Amino acid sequence: MKVTDHLKAAKDTLFSFEILPPLKGKSIQSIFDGIDPLMEFNPKFVNVTYHREEYIYKERENGLLEKIAIRKRPGTVGICAAIMNKYDVDAVPHLICGGFSKEETENALIDLQFLGIDNVLALRGDSIKTESSFRPHKDGHEFAVDLIGQIGEMNSGNYLMDDIKLEPTDFCIGAAGYPEKHFEAMNLSTDLQYLKAKVDAGAEYIVTQMFFDNAKYFAFVEACREIGITVPIIPGLKPIKTLKHISFLPKFFHIDYPEELSKELLKCKTNAEVAEVGVEWGIHQSKELKEAGAPCIHYYTMSNSASVKSIAKEIF
Ligand code: FAD
């Protein structure tokens, strides 16, 4: 079932979450161990992230360094199929522009269709870790809007290289939105215009980057509505878990902590104390979002379902 159909059928705020494929070599059980504790809250869909290749350097016998591409977290599509099979819940694979030619994208979408997966979160993707900015595949897409356009074309029966119409796919397409602005955008206003372009190209709902200040989400939704973005906007929340997260999350995701939260975090001396603050803050944010009628609250587990469970117990 499509994410948008779940949202339409919902009588109250839905619960959903995102997981990462495990590091290469770990079994599917490690994924199930993260999902099992959250199933009692009746998630309507589970997102699975996509991780592109990274480059490492290996020293050869002659002393020269060899650049090798590796993918540390493969398996997005297989995990989606396994989740749907085991839990009978919809899985939403993330599909990115980075590293994909248009033809590879088309073939990946055909695989998804054969597996009965009719949801996709269409993203540009992060840059390769060792590169300072995003570089598209030479035969691929530069922006998420172009990927959304390609999926939209397939939904109309227009595949690459074919002059005749083929059997249309029926993907429900989601896109990413940034209440605190995407870090590369000139300003929030241009970022919102590009977000609108994604919706105009066929994105049927938006999932936001994590944020810790609900006021920023509410202002973002209002700004979206003002420029004619009418699709559901699902807030994304991340429970802070460790001392390392305190500086990592703002740095990596380009988000700020509100004053009140940062004061509480500064008092923490251990991971356990941070996790407690993270859960309390997550409950506070979730309650307010639910009361305000958020269509769904989407939790970034980042392989940590314990904190999400503690929050969900109070909310769903
Ligand atoms: P875009 O919408 O293409 O925007 C990228 C930047 O370009 C923005 O600054 C935008 O303002 C600008 N822009 C957009 N269109 C144009 C245009 N036509 N002309 C000029 N500028 C333009 N990354 C992964 O690698 N794997 C994942 O699984 C993953 N999951 C994510 C899930 C969510 C909910 C979110 C919020 C992010 C996720 N990301 C993931 C990170 C995401 O890929 C990065 O934030 C990436 O830098 C931007 O992706 P996007 O789809 O928002 O890009």
Image (cartoon, rainbow, N blue to C red):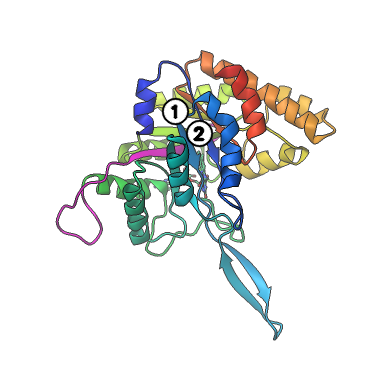
Q: Is residue 269 above or below residue 150?
A: above
Q: Which residue is mark 1?
A: 233
Prevailing SS of the magenta stretch: loop
**Contact, mark 1 vs mark 2 (Cβ under 8 Å):** yes
Span colored in magenta: 157-181
Which element carries disc 2, helix, strand or loop?
Answer: strand
Q: Amino acid at mark 1?
A: Ile
Q: Which mark is residue 2?
A: none
For residue 190, say whether it is visible.
no
Count how many numbered circles sit on residues in the image.
2
Which image quadrant: the C terminus?
Answer: top right
Relative image position of residue 178 (x, y in whole percent): 51, 35
For residue 78, say whether it is visible.
yes
Q: Which mark is residue 208?
A: 2
172 magenta-colored: yes
Relative image position of residue 308 (x, y in whole percent): 62, 29
Ligand 1: does it lie within 8 Å of the C-beta at label 2?
A: yes
46 relative to 37 in the view: left or right: left
Which image quadrant: the N terminus?
Answer: top left
Alpha-carbon span between mark 1 and mark 2: 7 Å
Which of the pair 74/219 is nearer the observer? 74
